[in-house]
Image (tube, rainbow, N blue to C red):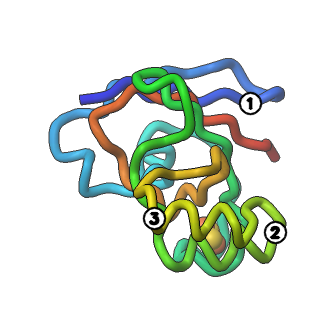
């Protein structure tokens, strides 16, 4: 299972080893379990409060897991993804952005760095 490094300008970086079964959890759940202070509100992919930036260290690029419909809508509303990127994602089956919602993103077996704003 992956190493997830949480990074914020206001806190020390913390690397968490995600144990087996973590692929059924959201990144926000993993963060909460490890006392990482990622901001959140609805926990349902609607408010955009849990916006994070993800770098995949395994693939050296954006995170490989697919965006959920809710992520697509919120990221579009926030100006973090364009219609052209959405269409490219549907054709090529790749995630075209590093921006994700922590409450929607599910872990895969890939090492990632998660940048989050901080309270
Ligand atoms: S907490 Fe509202 S979108 Fe994640």
Q: Is residue 107 above or below residue 40?
A: above
User: How far apart in space, not on screen, are marks 2 and 3 (Cα)?
Assistant: 23 Å
Q: Nearer the viewer, residue 50 or 78?
A: 78
Label 1 – label 2 distance at C-alpha: 20 Å
Residue that label 2 marks: 78
Q: Is residue 38 visible?
A: no
Lower sequence index among marks 2 and 3: 2
Q: Which numbered disc, 1 or 2, marks the residue closer to the eye?
A: 2
Q: Which mark is residue 91?
A: 3
Real-space Cα separation, disc 3 to disc 1, in angstroms: 33 Å
* Cβ atoms at labels 2 and 3 below 8 Å apart: no
In this view of the protein, can residue 6 be seen by the observer? yes
Residue 4: x and y in percent read 45, 29
Q: Residue at x 31, y 42 (%)?
A: 108
Q: Residue at x 22, y 33 (%)?
A: 19
Which residue is more in the foreground, 12 or 91? 91
**Badge number at residue 41:** none
Mark 3 vs ligand 1: CB below 8 Å: no
Q: Which mark is residue 8?
A: 1
Question: Does 22 sit left or right of 81 as displayed?
Answer: left
* Disc 1 within 8 angstroms of ligand 1 (CB): no
Circles 1 and 2: CB atoms closer than 8 Å? no
Q: Which mark is first along the chain, 2 or 1?
A: 1
């Amino acid at each position: 299972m992956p190493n997830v490094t949480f990074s914020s300008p206001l806190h020390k970086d913390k690397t968490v080893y995600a144990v087996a079964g973590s692929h059924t959890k959201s990144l926000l759940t993993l963060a909460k379990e490890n006392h990482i202070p990622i901001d959140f509100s609805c926990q349902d992919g609607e408010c955009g409060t849990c916006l994070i930036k993800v770098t995949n260290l395994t693939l050296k690029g954006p995170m490989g897991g697919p965006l959920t419909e809710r992520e697509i809508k919120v990221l579009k509303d926030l100006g973090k993804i364009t219609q052209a990127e959405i269409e490219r994602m549907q054709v090529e089956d790749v995630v075209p952005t590093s921006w994700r919602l922590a409450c929607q993103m599910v872990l895969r077996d890939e090492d990632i760095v998660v940048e989050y704003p901080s309270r």
